[in-house]
């Protein structure tokens, strides 16, 4: 994959460090970040053993050109001192499409017209991000199932169903409004087994109503 590519940089950090990390990113030419909140699925004992701090998380979603994104991850590893931004992980996702005006701004060159969509190719990776949308209250059961196939933990984001109407139906299947999105980063070799066991035990027609998908990661680093 060439340098003419736009990436999403996803940061999952301890609660309270998101704003400072966004400032760190802006100073390194990654100025476009959105922050939301989540919480980890590991027990407090496991968090202590792994040394990854609080279960409450700040999640940053940032856009950057591929060179800027890769440079940022390099600088996180080499410039951030231990405990200065807490603990967490940062990873890149290759985008398959983006508004061309936004892409132009991130790539740092001009492009005429109002702008349509800028399309890129997906990349293969050693790590994958599994996204599981479940009905609220089923997160623990789904994560326990995922661990049977090798998942070590995940981050949960609260969400709501936003279908085209209020019928609560999705292709004839009843849909619960309150949702939780579980984000699991894992080795790609474990991805299919994790997704398959979740779908088998907690699929769309079960109480959990899980919708499961995955995205290949470009690079991943850990905050100290």
Image (cartoon, grey):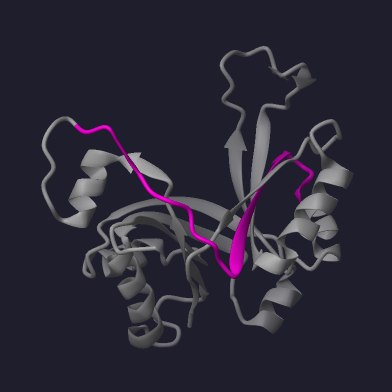
User: Residue, x 48% and y 65% (percent of image)?
Assistant: 218
Q: Percent position (x, y) of residue 162?
A: 57, 25
In which quadrant is the N terminus drawn?
A: bottom left
Using residue 101 as the reference point, say whether residue 216 is left or right of it.
right
Using residue 224 as the reference point, say whether residue 158 is left or right of it.
right
Question: Quarter-wise, where is residue 63 in the image?
Answer: bottom left
Question: Quarter-wise, where is residue 167 in the image?
Answer: top right
User: Residue, x 59% and y 38% (percent of image)?
Assistant: 159
Question: Quarter-wise, where is residue 116 in the image?
Answer: top left
- The residue lying toward the viewer, choosing from 59 and 53, is 59
User: Residue, x 45% and y 83% (percent of image)?
Assistant: 83
Using residue 217 as the reference point, say whether residue 109 is left or right of it.
left
In the displayed structure, 176 sits above or below 49; it is above
Q: Percent position (x, y) of residue 187?
A: 66, 69
Q: How many marks?
A: 0
Q: Percent position (x, y) of residue 72?
A: 33, 72
Q: Does the magenta run of residues contain 118?
A: yes
- In this picture, which residue range is highlighted in magenta? 115-139
In the displayed structure, 37 sits above or below 220; it is above
User: Residue, x 34% and y 42% (percent of image)?
Assistant: 98
Using residue 3 as the reference point, say whether residue 61 is left or right of it.
right
Q: Percent position (x, y) of residue 196?
A: 81, 51
- The residue lying toward the viewer, choosing from 100 and 36, is 100
């Amino acid at each position: 994959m060439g340098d003419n590519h736009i990436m999403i940089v996803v940061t999952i950090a301890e609660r309270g460090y998101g704003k400072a990390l966004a400032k760190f990113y802006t100073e390194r030419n990654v100025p476009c970040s959105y922050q939301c909140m989540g919480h980890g699925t590991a027990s407090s004992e496991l968090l202590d053993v792994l040394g990854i701090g609080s279960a409450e998380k700040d999640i940053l979603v940032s856009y950057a050109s591929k060179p800027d994104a890769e440079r940022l991850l390099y600088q996180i590893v080499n410039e951030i001192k231990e405990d200065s931004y807490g603990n967490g992980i940062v990873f890149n996702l290759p985008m398959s499409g983006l508004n061309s005006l936004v892409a132009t701004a991130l790539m740092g060159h001009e492009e005429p017209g109002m702008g349509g969509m800028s399309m890129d190719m997906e990349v293969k990776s050693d790590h994958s991000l599994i996204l599981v949308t479940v009905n609220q209250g089923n997160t623990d059961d789904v994560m326990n199932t995922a661990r049977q196939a090798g998942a070590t933990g995940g981050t949960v984001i609260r969400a709501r169903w936003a279908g085209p109407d209020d019928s609560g139906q999705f292709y004839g299947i009843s849909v619960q409004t309150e949702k939780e999105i579980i984000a699991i980063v894992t080795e790609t070799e474990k991805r299919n087994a994790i997704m398959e066991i979740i779908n088998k035990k907690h699929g769309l027609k079960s109480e959990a109503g899980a919708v499961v998908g995955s995205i290949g990661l470009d690079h991943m680093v850990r905050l100290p």
